[in-house]
Amino acid sequence: MTEIAVIGGGYAGLGAIGALQDVPHVHITLIDPGTGHQLIPELPEALSRHGSVSNHIVPYDQLLESASVSLVNSRAMSIDWTLRTISSANGSVTAFDWLVLAAGSEPSLPPIPGLREFAHPLRDAADTLRIKESLRYLKEQRIVVVGGGLTGVEVAGMLAPDHDVVLIEAAHRLLPALGKGLAEYALRRLQRSGVITTVGQKVQAVENQLVILERDHYGFDVLIWAGGITVPTWVKNLGLPLDNRGYPLADHYGKVGDQVYVAGDLWRVVVDDHDVAATAQVAALAGTYVGELIARKIQGEPGGSPFLPRIRGMLISLDPGQGVGWVLHGGIPVRGMSARTLKSLSFQQYRQKLARRFNKPWLVGSNL
């Protein structure tokens, strides 16, 4: 029996498991501390007045019922590369022949005075739940969101109908992953929704109910940090070669060691000398790619071509009814209700893909 360990049950980890679970004579162990697969791109919607965090988590005990897949419901802590074993926080030890390291990322919190003390980072379902518990859904409650990328913009837009929202971005415009015209449309839409937007200023310090910028300052009741992601510290300490930004040094196939691969946020994918944005879509594609690659190698087949993600689009929710982004390979811009509808359809399409991959028809049309 060939033992495959997958660390992380996100989009990349499930993509790899889906590609590997039907390979003969293979046993897969998923190591993850959570209760289920978190639909990370949907979490900003859980912050809306009637949103529920649990609706955006697919329970592992219902999803992973195949005899070829086991779950270690704990956090991976260290890896012995000589013995090829993974030690987890609950004391379990998992042996592996092949490893897919898809542990995701963690919020990047720079050493700004007061930031760790007062800010709510937003990266996963637990973060989302803590933020939601602090919201009162009253206009007099001021929410300051730091980070004008994909997550920050969506959070600001979702909270605007019920709160006084300030969005802060250190760069000179929002949404650097989108074209300038689409970013300007998003800015206008947010401002019409009442979001105060401040660009071109970095946070200098955070005090109790006050965020201090280079020129301005804003009071807050809740401070949400959406200012980027980084490689988890424990991954940096595994002894793998790292690049100049702390990412595991992977080749064009995701390989970082002998029968060891990375996928998802831990794989810094570069195409034509440009970093590919770390999105759920890219993570799912990378996980499936690595899973299929390992499956071919186990069965003695050629490995195939290097990973080249074919991104179908990028869509951002600006509020419960509007969105912005682009679709298809040529990058056709979409705005307004049509973009928001397409965003919702993309969520449903992913659930349909999960349903097919793991033979769970209840996922289709389900709010979980």
Image: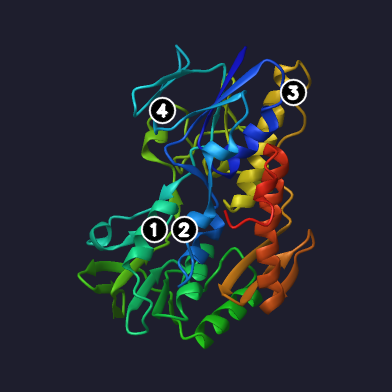
Q: Is residue 166 above or below residue 64?
A: below
**How many numbered badges does the structure rendering display?**
4
At horizontal 60% and vertical 67% (from top left) the residue drawn is: 316
Q: Residues within 10 Å of mark 3 (few under 14, many from 20)?
A: some
The residue wearing badge 1 is: 129
The residue wearing badge 3 is: 296
For discs 4 and 1, the disc positioned in front in the rendered view: 1
Quarter of the image for the N terminus: give it. Answer: top right
- Depth check: give the residue in front, 205 or 224: 224
Query: How far apart in space, not on screen, are marks 4 and 1 (Cα)?
Result: 30 Å
Describe the colour scheme in one phrase. rainbow
Q: Is residue 44 above or below residue 33?
A: below
For discs 3 and 1, the disc positioned in front in the rendered view: 1
Task: Give the secondary structure at mark 3.
Answer: helix
Task: Give the secondary structure at mark 2.
Answer: helix
Q: Residues within 10 Å of mark 4 (few under 14, many from 20)?
A: some
Looking at the image, can residue 172 be seen? no
Mark before the other along the chain sequence, 4 or 3: 4
- Depth check: give the residue in front, 279 or 354: 354
Find residue 237 and report its horizontal and vertical position in percent: 37, 31
At horizontal 53% and vertical 18% (from top left) the residue drawn is: 96
Q: Are marks 2 and 3 in contact (CB under 8 Å)?
A: no
The residue wearing badge 4 is: 238
